[in-house]
Image (cartoon, rainbow, N blue to C red):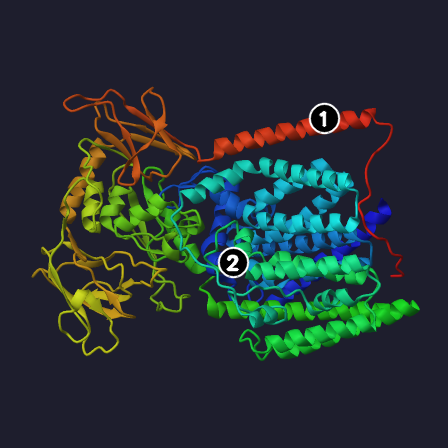
């Protein structure tokens, strides 16, 4: 046992060391965080994953508002368990607790590196399990897999996907255990861990491992009964493992059912030259399959069909499997199977890591039978030349890729040729030189490929600064004003990332997740809110009426983020405005049941229960100064600045609602400049304040469009702040006298005699149940998107219930718990049955997994 474990341990350590070295060296070359001034927080890494890990840090240190069930900091109260399963289920995520809170970017970077290294170690162990061979070769190919193009180009800024990279070799090991009839219980736990860490990529990894298992059974040439028994053990292991993960998996499934619908995309395969290009080092393209595994592994995989030392069935089997999976990436029906029958909104090749794993396993079979001879290596070099020739027409092969390709090819061919000569003559020094050359080539080309991806991503995707002075000022301002749950503190409309409340604290409307609820997005949109990511990244709304409705008693105001290229530097002062607002739970004696209409001002009044706006008629003057047809502005041939004219009562607060306008707006001669950002279909601009109306009441709002847009009728709202204060005072007087919030529970004491409905200023997401007094809990009602609970008072009769309790259970949790419990019981029975059987059996009855052994000198 020690003889088996020692090479695997050495291979795993080498693979992890090479991976970490190349991982960090790439960021040194790219001058990227934490080794340079360039940020690595691009796209969802900065917007989602770093803030989610920051919230996890707060949870682990007892500083978060909410718990595993409800995140009270985001979206005015969002279901958090589906987010845990989607973004934070990996055990590696817990490591962020060991870092200081203001080093959360470094914590995520370290977690990303450790996941990548773990994938390398797992693949190295798998290779030596599939077939004995040189431990250093297994380590080299393990690093090739972990640093594949998919890993460095796509998953490095989607760190939860890296759990799938780790899962694939582990699930293949589970398949090997199923063939041998060993470690069944450990296999179940491995499957459960993989599906808990990230079910999305675990699903793809499970499909990949199933293909590997089927090929292994075919190549093993086992009797049908034994092969079926092995397949049955594997299926049972997966079923029990997924069952144990069901409490999270079912919650995520139902969470997606209640999420705001994203864009439906049709799959369109990329050109063949782009697929070939992504096999080569130092290439990058967002929408193409990143299947680079290093020139050494690629040459070995290409040499496999011509390697005469490898049995014909092994050569044919692995070659055909690689080709079949490659074609499946480009065919729409199999594309849908790989992605759980839903085309992703982003890159359509998220399963590419499975193909990378198969290429590496094929390369291992070519090397473990002995280095390819001259004939096989020449054929592989010829195929590589054809790949390069075919990829030459792709725009993804940039000028700097050619020297990296030539050096990597020379190093790989030289190293493999030296290895073949050393193996033939048993020359240890020559073999050592070959190892150094191959490892050096692997390190160099992978670091260059990763550095290229890091640099090019910055030009293709949005990017965000790591934690710095801006975030620290915001966090300090929020902490100084926070008094949750007496009122909410919103971190502000001038967002730094899409999940500011999780990053800098407070309890705001902002929330960005794949599971952003439909009711939250639609409610805030009806109230004049803006969003990005096609409605799944809702933004804070700087509006006095919605602050009263949602009990926002403190609001932070920051200058625009200077890191964003489209925003100018505007000082660094952070201020806080306070407002006397009702409590989180209010009572509506005569609720207005009218449905939301097209005007956000009237919709706000419906939720508030009072008329506070004047919505005047307006005129839009286009780029030429003439009335604009349909309110269209920004035609691109401006003669004069477009403008809006209207009349508001003197002293009222002026708001502009222009969801389909991108640019700036400013009251003539007064007020601050407001920015609007609309880009169909990704972005919708939020309502913005423009300052008080002048004494004359005549408004002229000057527009500076960035692109063609439209100003709707009823775009201007004139808010009577005195009426708003009266409405807020009335809601406060009749609202709850005491409110307590803990994770998934809201408790409130109501004034005696309350009647009508109690409204909780939180979105009525699925899973809320409420009870008044000592009555039974029932599914919560809805009042214009918020939680509503009928009180027992009727018209002319005062109510007797003076308490309200609302509890939240994520949809699918009970079902998942039941399935998980049944799986745990089945696993316990299986353990007991196995133990009793072993006690009665005369000796162990395990089967050695099918693999060939070779004697190696090194």
* Rendered residue at 74%/51% (across/down): 126
Residue 596 place in picture, x, y as percent = 22, 45
Callout 1: few (<14), some (14-19), or many (20+) C-alpha neighbours within 10 Å? Answer: few
Dot 1: element: helix
Quadrant containing the C terminus is bottom right
Query: Can you see residue 773?
Result: yes
Which image quarter is the N terminus in? top right
Q: Earlier in the sequence, mark 2 or mark 1?
A: 2
Percent across and percent down for residue 774 are 34, 19
Residue identifier under label 2: 332
- In percent of the image, x 55 and y 51: which residue is there? 337
Q: Which corner quadrant of the image does residue 677 belong to?
A: bottom left
What whole-number distance in Å separates the C-alpha atoms at marks 2 and 1? 45 Å
Would you name the residue on which mark 1 appears? 832
**Looking at the image, which is closer to me, 597 or 15?**
597
Q: Quadrant of residue 438?
A: bottom right
Q: Secondary structure at mark 2?
A: helix
Within-10-Å neighbours for mark 2: few <14, some 14–19, many 20+: some
Residue 168 image point, x, y percent: 65, 51
> In the visual, does 97 lie left or right of 571?
right
Q: Point out the frontmost of discs 2 and 1.
A: 2
Q: Is residue 797 left or right of residue 518?
A: left
């Amino acid at each position: 046992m020690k003889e088996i474990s020692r090479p695997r341990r050495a291979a795993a350590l080498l693979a992890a060391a090479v991976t970490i070295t190349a991982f960090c060296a790439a960021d040194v070359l790219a001058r990227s965080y934490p080794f340079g001034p360039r940020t690595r927080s691009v796209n969802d890494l900065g917007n989602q994953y770093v803030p989610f890990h920051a919230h996890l840090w707060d949870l682990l240190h007892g500083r978060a508002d909410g718990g595993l069930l409800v995140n009270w900091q985001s979206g005015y109260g969002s279901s958090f368990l589906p987010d845990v399963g989607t973004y934070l289920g990996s055990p590696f995520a817990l490591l962020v607790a060991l870092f200081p809170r203001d080093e959360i970017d470094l914590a995520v970077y370290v977690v990303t590196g450790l996941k990548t290294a773990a994938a390398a170690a797992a693949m190295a162990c798998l290779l030596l399990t599939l077939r004995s061979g040189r431990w250093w070769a297994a380590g080299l190919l393990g690093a090739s897999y972990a640093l594949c193009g998919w890993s460095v180009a796509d998953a490095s800024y989607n760190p939860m996907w890296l759990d799938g990279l780790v899962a694939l070799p582990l699930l293949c090991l589970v398949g090997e255990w199923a063939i041998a009839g060993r470690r069944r219980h450990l296999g179940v736990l491995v499957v459960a861990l993989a599906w808990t860490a990230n079910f999305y990529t675990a699903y793809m990894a499970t499909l990949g491992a199933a293909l590997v298992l089927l090929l292994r059974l075919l190549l093993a040439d086992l009797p049908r009964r034994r092969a079926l028994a092995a397949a049955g053990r594997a299926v049972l292991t997966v079923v029990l493992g997924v069952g144990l993960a069901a409490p999270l998996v079912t919650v995520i499934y139902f969470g997606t059912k209640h999420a705001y619908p994203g864009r439906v995309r049709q799959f369109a395969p990329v050109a063949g030259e782009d697929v070939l290009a992504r096999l080569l080092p130092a290439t990058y393209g967002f929408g193409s399959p990143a299947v680079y595994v290093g020139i050494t592994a690629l040459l070995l995989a290409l040499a496999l069909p011509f390697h005469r030392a490898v049995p014909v069935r092994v050569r044919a089997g692995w070659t055909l499997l690689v080709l079949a999976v490659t074609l499946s990436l480009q065919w729409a029906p199999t594309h849908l199977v790989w992605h759980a029958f839903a085309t992703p909104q982003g890159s359509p090749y998220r399963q590419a890591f499975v193909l990378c794993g198969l290429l590496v396993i094929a390369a291992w079979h070519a090397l473990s039978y002995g280095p390819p001879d001259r004939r096989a290596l020449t054929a592989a070099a010829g195929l590589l030349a054809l790949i390069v020739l075919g990829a030459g027409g792709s725009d993804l092969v940039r000028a700097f890729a050619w020297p990296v390709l030539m050096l990597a090819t020379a190093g790989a061919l030289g190293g493999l040729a030296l290895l073949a000569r050393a193996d033939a003559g048993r020359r240890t020094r020559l073999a050592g030189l070959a190892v150094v050359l191959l490892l050096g080539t692997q390190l160099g080309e992978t670091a260059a490929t990763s550095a290229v991806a890091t640099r090019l991503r910055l030009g293709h995707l949005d990017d965000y600064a790591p934690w710095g002075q801006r975030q620290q000022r915001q966090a300090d301002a929020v902490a100084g004003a926070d008094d949750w749950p007496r009122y909410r503190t919103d971190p502000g409309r001038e967002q730094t990332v899409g999940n500011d409340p999780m990053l800098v604290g407070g309890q705001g409307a902002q929330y960005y997740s794949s599971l952003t609820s439909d009711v939250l997005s639609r409610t805030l949109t009806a109230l004049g809110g803006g969003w990005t990511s096609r409605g799944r990244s809702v933004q804070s709304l700087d509006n006095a009426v919605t602050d009263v409705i949602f009990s926002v008693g403190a609001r932070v105001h920051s200058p625009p983020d200077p890191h964003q290229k489209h925003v100018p530097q505007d000082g660094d002062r952070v201020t806080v405005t306070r407002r006397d607002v009702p409590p989180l739970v209010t009572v509506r004696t005569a609720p207005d049941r009218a449905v939301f209409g097209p005007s956000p001002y009237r919709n706000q009044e419906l939720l508030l229960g009072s008329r506070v706006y004047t919505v005047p008629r307006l005129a839009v003057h286009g780029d030429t100064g003439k009335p604009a047809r349909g309110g269209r502005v920004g035609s691109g041939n401006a003669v004069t600045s477009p403008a809006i004219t209207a009349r508001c009562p003197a002293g009222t607060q002026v708001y502009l609602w222009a969801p389909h306008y991108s640019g700036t707006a400013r009251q003539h001669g007064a007020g601050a400049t407001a920015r609007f950002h609309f880009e169909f279909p990704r972005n919708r601009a939020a309502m913005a304040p423009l300052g008080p109306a002048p004494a004359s009441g005549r408004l002229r709002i000057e527009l500076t469009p960035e692109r063609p847009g439209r100003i709707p009728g009823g775009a201007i709202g004139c808010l009577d702040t005195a009426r708003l204060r009266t409405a807020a005072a009335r809601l406060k007087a009749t609202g709850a006298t005491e409110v307590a919030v803990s994770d998934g529970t809201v408790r409130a004491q109501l004034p005696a005699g309350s009647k009508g409905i109690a409204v909780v200023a939180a979105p009525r997401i699925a899973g809320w149940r409420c009870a008044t007094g000592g009555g039974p809990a029932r599914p919560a009602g809805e009042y214009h998107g918020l939680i509503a609970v009928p009180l027992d008072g009727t018209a002319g009769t005062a109510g007797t219930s003076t308490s309200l309790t609302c509890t939240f259970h994520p949809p699918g949790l009970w079902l998942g718990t039941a399935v998980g419990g049944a799986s745990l019981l089945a696993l316990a029975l299986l353990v007991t049955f196995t133990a009793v059987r072993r006690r009665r059996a005369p000796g162990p009855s395990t089967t050695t997994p099918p693999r060939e052994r070779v004697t190696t000198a090194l």
